[in-house]
Image (tube, grey):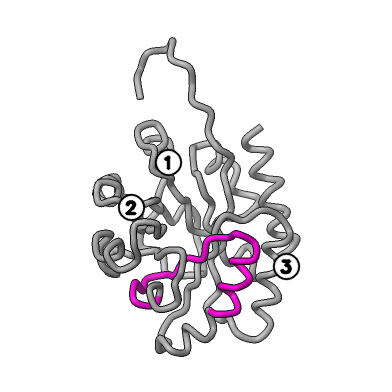
């Protein structure tokens, strides 16, 4: 990246949607996931369950993984390198206490997609990038009921990352079709969303996100 005004600006790829599962993924959730993925393009789906033994988690993941595979949507496991390896997931998303990028790469292979939660920290993001992460996640950008918010990120973090690094960045935390525009404009490569999709009509929500993202990129 250079400050030279004569350099042509590199055109950004459009911001993409990254769906995160609700904690309850049984019942009719596989059908809901299929409807959401068929509503409009989705880049990735993160399987996020808590306080569950790995055998049960693997059982619940199986139909969801198949739905994603049929639609060429990356299936990412939240927090657990061992579960990701067990079910042959496309990748893993690591919190700061869930193991290292190096450990995930060794377990899952060079083609695995490895993401790292970096909260509001430039330092953590640069460390993750240097360790070989495939993407970094910043947030929360807005209040959210999906999980307890301990860190609040600002738009200038996305702008800074986008101006200096080629590794994609994910925005997360309380994102809705109504508030996502500034995140897209600031440089988020992916919008990670959960409640805004699953707490209502998933088809309408996914379509609304795409309309909002397209408008922001126009």
- Which residue is found at the position 35% from the left and 55% from the top? 119
Q: Position of residue 8 (x, y in %)?
A: 48, 17
Q: Position of residue 106 (x, y in %)?
A: 27, 64
- Which residue is found at the position 62% from the left and 63% from the top? 196
Q: Which residues are magenta?
A: 62-83
Q: Secondary structure at mark 1?
A: helix
- Mark 1 and mark 3 in contact (Cβ < 8 Å)? no
Q: Quadrant of residue 195?
A: bottom right
- Tell how many labels: 3
Tag on residue 158?
1
Q: Can you tell which of label 2 and label 1 is closer to the viewer?
A: 2
- Mark 1 and mark 2 in contact (Cβ < 8 Å)? no
Q: Quadrant of residue 152?
A: bottom left
Tag on residue 188?
none
Q: Secondary structure at mark 3?
A: helix
Q: CA distance from mark 3 to mark 2?
A: 30 Å
**Mark closer to the chain start, 3 or 2:** 3
Q: Position of residue 76 (x, y in %)?
A: 47, 65
**Mark closer to the chain start, 3 or 1:** 3
Q: Is residue 88 above or below residue 196?
A: below
């Amino acid at each position: 990246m250079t400050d030279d005004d004569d350099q042509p600006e590199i055109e950004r790829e459009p911001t993409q949607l990254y769906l995160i599962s609700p904690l309850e993924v049984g019942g009719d959730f596989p059908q809901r996931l299929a409807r959401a993925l068929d509503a409009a393009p989705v880049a990735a789906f993160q399987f996020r369950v808590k306080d569950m033994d790995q055998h049960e988690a693997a059982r619940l993941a199986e139909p969801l993984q198949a739905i994603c595979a049929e639609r060429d949507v990356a299936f990412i496991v939240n927090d657990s390198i061992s579960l990701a390896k067990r079910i042959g997931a496309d990748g893993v998303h690591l919190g700061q206490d869930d193991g290292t990028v190096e450990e995930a790469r060794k377990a899952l292979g060079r083609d695995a997609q490895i993401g790292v939660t970096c909260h509001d920290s430039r330092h953590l993001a640069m460390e993750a990038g240097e360790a070989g992460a495939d993407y970094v996640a910043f947030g929360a950008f807005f209040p959210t009921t999906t999980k307890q918010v301990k860190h609040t990120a600002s738009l200038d973090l996305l702008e800074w990352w986008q101006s200096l690094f080629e590794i994609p960045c994910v925005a997360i935390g309380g994102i809705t079709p109504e508030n996502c525009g500034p995140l897209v404009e600031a440089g988020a490569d992916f919008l990670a969303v959960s409640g805004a999709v699953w707490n209502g009509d998933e088809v309408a929500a996914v379509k609304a996100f795409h309309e909002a993202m397209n408008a922001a990129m126009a």
